[in-house]
Amino acid sequence: MNTNFLSLTLELFVGFFALLVMTKVLGKNQITQLTPFDFISALVLGELVGNAIYDKDIGLHYVLYAVVVWGLLIYTIEMITQKIRESRPWLEGTPSLIISKGQIQYEELKKNKLDLDQLLHLLRDKGVFSVREVEYGILETNGAVNVMRKQPIDYPTNRDLHIPPQPVHLPVLLIQDGEIIEEGLAKLKQDKAWLTNELFRLGIPGPTHVFFAEWQEGEGFEIQTY
């Protein structure tokens, strides 16, 4: 019994870290640009590890073999699509123009196995509650719909409002869950004493009382306490 638990624990550790390494190798597009093929590949990869771990007739080396071979296949496909542009429509699919000049393209919906209710749901995800607001709509390869609104109801930009350009700065996270973020202080070239003094100046006893704090150039602190 103890041997079985030890073997299962070892296989779980190996399977976990093998999947972790493979995820890093395959890149972030497995999540951020999840196509149907990527989704199925991720499911199969997890299923291979799961079956290998819980099947008593399959050893540890089979777990690693399954992860490596399947991961190499996915990695090869990714490399092909990056190097050979002509392969992308076949392996990744192509975006579809499903709304053109305010008109729903029925044939494109049919070709992409998308019905009207699904289209309206995807539009609502983008904050569009009527097709009449849309000039163009594109169904992306990951299943999302991106829209270009009709000009009269489109959002104005700073350029449209003749607002002079201003420098843009990323906010720096300084405290999270009561803990000081050292990397944030390093970016600002400050230390804990500076941050503590700033908190005291704002009437906050210390970092442990802060749920969230960030600092942005030109804006100063944004702080939420417990």
Image (tube, rainbow, N blue to C red):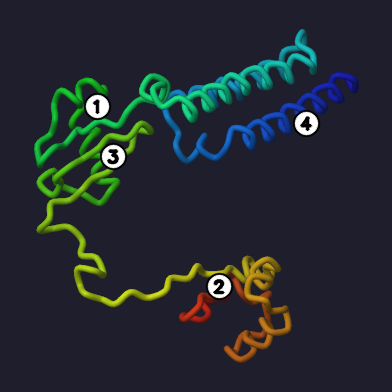
Task: Give how far apart the Cα atoms at labels 2 and 3 are.
Answer: 33 Å
Amino acid carrying mark 4 in the image: Phe
Q: Nearer the viewer's eye, disc 4 or disc 3?
A: 3
According to the picture, the residue beneath numbered tag 3 turns out to be 145
Q: CA distance from mark 4 to mark 3?
A: 39 Å
> Which residue is identified by label 4?
13
- The reply to whether callout 2 and callout 1 are in contact (CB within 8 Å) is no
Q: Between 194 and 119, which is closer to the camera in this rendering?
A: 194
Q: Secondary structure at mark 3?
A: strand
* SS for dot 1: loop
Q: Residue at x 23, y 45 (%)?
A: 147
Mark in front: 2 vs 4: 2
Residue at the bottom extreme, as displayed? 201
**Could you say whether the residue bearing mark 4 is in a helix, strand or loop?**
helix
**Mark 3 burial class by Cα count in 10 Å: few <14, some 14-19, many 20+:** many
Which of the two discs, 2 and 1, labels the residue nearer the N terminus?
A: 1
Q: CA distance from mark 1 to mark 4?
A: 41 Å
Q: Of the residues shown, which amino acid type is indicated by label 1? A: Leu
Q: Quadrant of the C terminus?
A: bottom right
Amino acid carrying label 3: it is Val
Kind of residue at disc 2:
Glu
